Amino acid sequence: MARMGGKRHLKRLAAPAFWPVPKKEAVWVVKPRAGPHPQFESIPLLVLVRDVLKLAETSREARKIISEGKIKVDGRVRKDYKFPVGKMDVIELVGADKYYRMVPYPTKYLIPIEIDAEEAKLKPVRIENKTTVKGGHIQLNLHDGRNILIKVSDPRNPVEAQDYKTLSTLLITLPDQQIQKIIPMKEGVIAIVSSGRNVGRVGRIEGIEAGMGRKETLVKMRDVHGEVFYTVIDYVFPIGEEEPIIKLPEGAWK
């Protein structure tokens, strides 16, 4: 994938392959601003409105829709047409009573799945790492750039943070990010592959083969058709224990 950093502009030929923009109709395309998702794993809001959701035919129309506050991302109005939208983000069309979640999908990498208003109040986020902050409290650093503080009574024995393991998934409310559920990264859990050659595949974890770091730790998964496949643990996103906690593309899970 082409490198996107370092410049304010982006040529269409260098844009990520999963963006649904014709490569040769024009020279330039909107470059996502630095934000909650890596630039090469996100879609700028203008491209999402115009080319993915088909709410506008031109950039001017898309920018007008966005600037009028008609698009919410994770429960907050976003008026920056370069705002990066990434995996598991919830998109709301204000006034239209329509909601979408950006979900990993085979070959296309990310697609919007229409969801109902109740599901739009929830979002799964993966714990990327944990840090200790002032006072001995534990800060959870999540995949979409947000942080959640877990307060502990005794910094030498932070029992309140013991269940929050790295690479586990939290189900939080939007936009106030209250934790509703923890889905650990372990055998028996349902997960979706968020990147790599198996992107978008959903399966149950059958084994974790530890290696030197995340890139060498392999996860064995079995999909809905009974096929076994492997991927690195860094690409695995837990989404449920008995059943998925989010709506998935048709056919992805039984």
Image: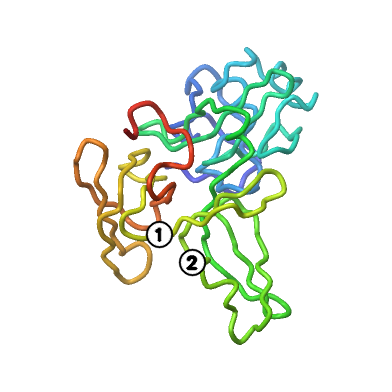
Which of the two residues, 211 or 239, is positioned nearer the viewer here? 239
Give me the residue at 32% from left, 72% from top.
Answer: 212
Mark 1 residue element: loop
Contact between marks 2 and 1 (CB within 8 A): the answer is yes
Q: Position of residue 130 (x, y in %)?
A: 56, 69
Q: Quadrant of the N terminus?
A: top left
What residue sits right under mark 2 in the picture?
165
Give me the residue at 64% from left, 38% from top.
Answer: 121
Give how far apart the Cα atoms at labels 2 and 1 are: 8 Å
Checking the image for residue 185, the label placed there is: 1
**Number of on-image labels:** 2
Which of the two residues, 115 or 90, is positioned nearer the viewer here? 115
Q: Quadrant of residue 26?
A: top right
For the rendered model, the colour scheme is rainbow
Q: Position of residue 98 (x, y in %)?
A: 63, 22
Looking at the rendered structure, the kind of residue marked 2 is: Lys
Q: Quadrant of the C terminus?
A: top left
Of all residues, the one furthest to the right in this rendering is 68
Looking at the rendered structure, the kind of residue marked 1 is: Met
Give me the residue at 51% from left, 68% from top.
Answer: 163
Checking the image for residue 137, the label placed there is: none
Of all residues, the one furthest to the front in this rendering is 242
Of all residues, the one furthest to the top in this rendering is 57
Q: Position of residue 137 (x, y in %)?
A: 67, 75
Give me the residue at 73% from left, 24% from top.
Answer: 94
Of all residues, the one furthest to the bottom in this rendering is 156
